[in-house]
Image (tube, coloured by chain):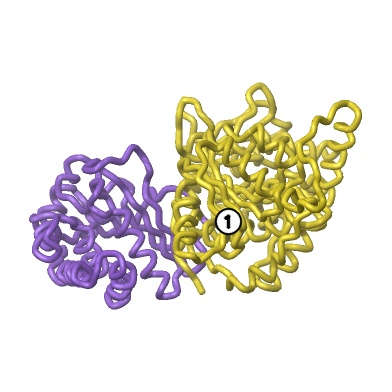
Chain colours: A purple, B yellow
């Protein structure tokens, strides 16, 4: 079973990202679970959302405490939250930051794989707003191969086009693709 | 077809496929999303339901009683304080023998105020005369609501059914659900048959008259008899349901129980977490097992007694308390085992949504191996000192 945590700030789409990943994984025949941490959320406060992906029915219904993958949607969270807490030694950390993967590795004293990208800039360039969840999703797919990019693209189109229109959907898909392209690792 | 649905979305889908005549509703966290989704189906014309947006849960259950007495197929949903506000009419629905199906999204009943899961709300209604079915995951939520509708409307039973699911843990978690075809559900539950409907003006009847010491007692006895039919009828419905869905259920679920030395007994989503830990312990050679109680009212005493006859050590995990008395599930299990000399211990966990993880379950399995006598004090899981 693969367990993933997305740490974000309220309003950045951590829940949406975790859920999209689960739904895309389900399309590939996997069993999934996805849920956010429900506390006193408000825009800007640190929030977490989780996804589990497995070959058989996901039976556990507890919080994800030892994820394989952590995605961080806001650079300022590195100071506010211990983002590697519980992350497996061999785990994967994907961070929205202008810093290099090496710098983050050193800063957090983390020995697993680190991937970084400037998801804020990518989302402003593509969607026109600071909505870093889509580039982070693209980066997670590059870092892990848990879901093929095509399937996520189709899932986003299927879920978003009716709600937000073709133009904005295309921009979101572009944000995913740019995140997938630009992410660097160490 | 597999869909990624939350427990609340699964409940709304089940309601859509049942297509009830009347749904009175009032919002409360974490139930709100069910009615939010169902209201969408009503607005889009996907169901024929008349939705009544009432001013409180007391009115929601009152409208449900009125509509069901009039001859309609009625469903609703609530949580915690909403269920508490309905309480008076919850009893009236059962004693009037109205086959209403209500999803209860379990949430801690204040105070202090808390929106997260425990079973204190539905446990407060365990003596109300409603049938209670508890769901482990979103698939079971969907299935139990459809099964519950057929059970409620059975001519021998005609009792209201609460289908419970864990607030947030199940209600707001995306899960893989395989809904049935709407046509299959329609045929499975069949036509709604009204008994003495108020709207049959050619044959006028009275509902809710004064019932004193002359007949009240006999009417209560009839509720006892109706409950007696639930277990055999539900077994038959489970068998029929497995034919249309391929999913086999029973009123209790034994997971590696038959040869188990240590057995945890619990309900709802925690049963899933416990199954995962049983798998781990079995790999290491420990004979661990999990007994899930799906039907809590009427309580399956004989089935539990039979299922646990080989168990050496038993832990009962309750997600609610009865202050000054045994916790609700523990009380029933102890009662079911009264003539077996078992080592059994009461654990309380997860109040107000406190997480229970695999480590916690593992610790219980390890602790109960060392039980030498029945333990008398409640043990608390994940409680700060």
Dot 1 crowding, Cα within 10 Å, few <14, some 14–19, many 20+: many
Residue positioned 33% across, 64% down in the render: A20
Residue that extends furthest to the front in the rendered view of this protein: B202
Whole-percent x, y for residue B255 in the image: 66, 57
Q: Quadrant of residue B130?
A: top right
**Residue at the far top in the pictured view:** B324
Quarter holding residue B151: bottom right
Residue visible at 66% across and 55% down in the picture: B73
- Is B254 located above or below residue A144 in the figure? above
Q: Is residue B294 left or right of residue A171?
A: right
Q: Nearer the viewer, residue B376 or A121?
A: A121
Q: Which residue is mark 1?
A: B141
Q: Is residue B344 visible?
A: no
* B59 or B222: nearer the viewer: B59
Quadrant of the image for the N terminus of chain A?
bottom left
What chain letter is assigned to the residue under label 1? Answer: B
Left or right side of B78 for A111: left
Residue B372 on image: x %, y %? 71, 34
Dot 1 falls on a residue whose secondary structure is helix
Position of residue B160 measured from the top left corner of the image (x, y, whole percent): 70, 47
Q: Is residue A93 left or right of residue B166?
A: left
- Residue B126, compared with residue A134, is above or below; it is above
Asked whether B59 or B279 is in front, the reply is B59
């Amino acid at each position: 079973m693969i367990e993933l945590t997305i740490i974000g700030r309220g309003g950045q789409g951590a829940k949406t990202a975790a859920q999209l990943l689960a739904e895309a994984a389900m399309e590939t025949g996997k069993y999934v679970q996805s849920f956010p941490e429900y506390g006193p959320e408000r825009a800007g406060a640190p929030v977490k959302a989780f996804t589990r992906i497995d070959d058989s029915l996901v039976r556990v219904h507890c919080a994800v405490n030892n994820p394989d993958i952590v995605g961080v949607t806001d650079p300022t969270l590195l100071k506010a939250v211990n983002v590697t807490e519980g992350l497996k030694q061999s785990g994967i950390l994907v961070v929205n930051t202008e810093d290099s993967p090496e710098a983050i590795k050193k800063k957090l004293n983390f020995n697993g794989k680190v991937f970084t990208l400037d998801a804020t800039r990518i989302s402003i360039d593509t969607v026109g707003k600071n909505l870093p969840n889509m580039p982070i999703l693209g980066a997670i797919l590059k870092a892990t191969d848990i879901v093929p990019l095509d399937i996520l693209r189709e899932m986003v189109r299927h879920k978003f086009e009716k709600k937000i229109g073709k133009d904005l959907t295309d921009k979101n898909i572009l944000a995913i693709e740019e995140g997938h392209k630009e992410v660097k690792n160490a | 077809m597999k869909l990624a649905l939350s427990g609340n979305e699964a409940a709304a889908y089940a309601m859509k496929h049942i297509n009830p005549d009347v749904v009175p509703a009032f919002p409360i966290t974490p139930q709100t999303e069910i009615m939010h989704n169902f209201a969408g189906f009503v607005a889009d014309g996907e169901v024929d339901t008349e939705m009544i947006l009432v001013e409180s849960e007391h009115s929601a259950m009152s409208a449900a009683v009125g509509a069901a007495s009039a001859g309609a197929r009625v469903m609703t949903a609530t949580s915690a304080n909403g269920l508490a506000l309905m309480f008076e009419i919850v009893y009236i629905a059962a004693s009037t023998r109205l086959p209403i199906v209500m999803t209860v999204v379990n949430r801690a009943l204040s105070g202090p105020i808390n929106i997260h899961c425990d079973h204190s709300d539905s446990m407060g209604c365990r003596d109300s005369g409603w049938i209670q079915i508890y769901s482990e995951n979103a698939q079971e939520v969907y299935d139990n609501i459809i099964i519950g509708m057929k059970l409620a409307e059975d001519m021998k039973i005609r009792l209201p059914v609460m289908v419970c699911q864990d607030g947030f843990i199940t209600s707001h978690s995306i899960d893989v659900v395989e809904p049935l075809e709407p046509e299959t559900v329609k045929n499975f539950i069949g036509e709604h048959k009204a008994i003495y409907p108020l709207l049959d003006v050619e044959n006028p009847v009275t509902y809710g008259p004064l019932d004193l010491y002359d007949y009240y007692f006999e009417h209560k006895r009839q509720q006892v008899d109706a409950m007696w039919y639930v277990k055999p009828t539900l077994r038959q419905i489970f068998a029929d349901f497995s034919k249309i869905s391929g999913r086999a259920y029973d009123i209790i679920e034994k997971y590696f129980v038959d040869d188990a030395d240590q057995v945890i007994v619990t309900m709802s989503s925690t049963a899933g977490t416990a199954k995962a830990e049983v798998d781990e312990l079995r790999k290491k050679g420990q004979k661990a097992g999990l007994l899930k109680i799906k039907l809590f009212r009427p309580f399956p005493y004989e089935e539990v007694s039979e299922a646990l006859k080989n168990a050496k050590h038993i832990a009962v995990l309750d997600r609610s308390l009865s202050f000054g008395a045994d916790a609700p599930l523990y009380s029933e299990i102890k009662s079911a085992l009264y003539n077996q000399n078992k080592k059994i211990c009461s654990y309380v966990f997860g109040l107000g949504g406190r997480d229970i993880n695999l480590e916690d379950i593992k610790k219980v399995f390890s602790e109960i191996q060392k039980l030498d006598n029945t333990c008398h004090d409640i043990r608390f899981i994940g409680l700060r000192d």
